Image: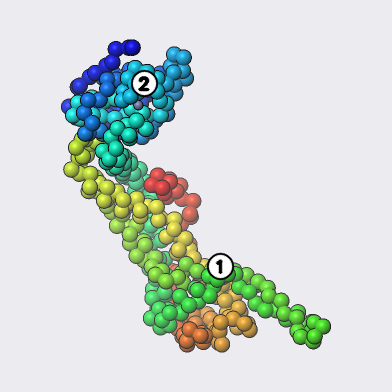
Amino acid sequence: MMDLAHHPVFEGQPSDDYLERWRQHTATTGRPEDFECVSTSRPTQHDNIVLLSEEITVPVLLRPGGERVPCSFCAPGSPKFIRGRMAYFPDEKTVRFVGHQCAATHYGENFRHAERLFRRQQACRDYFDTWQEIGARREALAQFVARMAKIAADLQFVRDQLDEQAKGYCEFLQRELAQTNGELFIDADLGMKDRTGNAVIQRKSIGRASGLKFLAYGYDVKRDVRHLQTALTDAAQPLPDWSPTTPEHPATDEILKRGRMVARAMRSMLATLASIDDGQRFFARKNLLLLHRWGNRPNTPFARFEISVDGRQVLFRSDSFAGLHYANVVVPEGTHTALPPANDPDVVFIERKVA
Ligand SMILES: [Zn+2]
């Protein structure tokens, strides 16, 4: 059996730079266990383990004979596994490359705890990276959000009028439209009679209505845009000093909290754009006319239905099992301003980054 290495030299968690070099060494040699200061001895204390990497598949074909990596737990010095993780043993001040299965078995609940802490450290690293990427695109992102903000405010102004004047109308219309995912069907009389003398009626589509998002319960693009603005403001403030340490660095909670908020907002940029776009499409003249045409056909939920446009005023009238609804709302000119493109490269980049 080969001599087992034991290097009790790590007073604290090894630096990311050390880990990166270890990773490189493993990738190029297939021998994670013979990097500088890596121990191959059997661990003597089983209370504490700190995970330093995700699961790494070792390119064992680079090893003499393509043999597997030895396991310091159950078979020090003998070939055992291919997939493993870098780990730190703070009580012993050592680091090892350990087989995933074996470490999980030996450390049980402590391993799961270590896994959780590892993910928290990874998230912090990711958020520092996110902050940097946002910083590099700050101007473009701010402009994108600013372009949405005015239109969102105008649309929300219209939606609020509708809710105030015709409570429940939007949700009611939305539910009706959602049954066919917006597709508008009418009964068309083909002008023929069947054998029993009844008119032949055919159900046909006259098109698809836009506005299912705009009409949905809780639509609030003004709030959505405000979240984006808040996130960009926060991302302009640096994160606190931090480094991956054991025990966990005290700034971790703050970084995770701010990071999650900013990441969530960045993930919603294009969804917010789509919600605003949907509102614009709802108020497109053609869409309103189509809805009006549909609502006035037989076999719709409406005894009476009207949508009419007069300059900036749009009138909604509906008589249905959901009651009488009437609203005459102002649609500001700005509602129809062109939105920024959904393929804005900076926005797409950041969304992918935090996905
Ligand atoms: Zn083992």
Q: Nearer the viewer, mark 2 or mark 1?
A: 2
Protein image colouring? rainbow
* Amino acid on which the number 2 mark rests in the picture: Pro
Is residue 302 visible in the rendered structure shown here? yes
Q: Identify the residue at image location x=17%, y=27%.
A: 11
Label whose residue precedes the other's in the sequence (2 or 1): 2
Would you place residue 67 above or below residue 114 in this image? above
Alpha carbons under labels 2 and 1: distance apart: 58 Å
Image quadrant of residue 145?
A: bottom left
Residue 297 at x, y = what percent? Answer: 63, 82
* Of 72 and 194, the residue lying toward us: 72
Q: Secondary structure at mark 2?
A: strand
Residue under label 1: 181
Q: Secondary structure at mark 1?
A: loop
Q: Residue furthest right?
A: 195
Q: Is residue 238 left or right of residue 31?
A: left
Residue 255 at x, y = what percent? Answer: 25, 46
Indicate which disc residue 70 carries.
Answer: 2
* Of 176 and 99, the residue lying toward us: 99
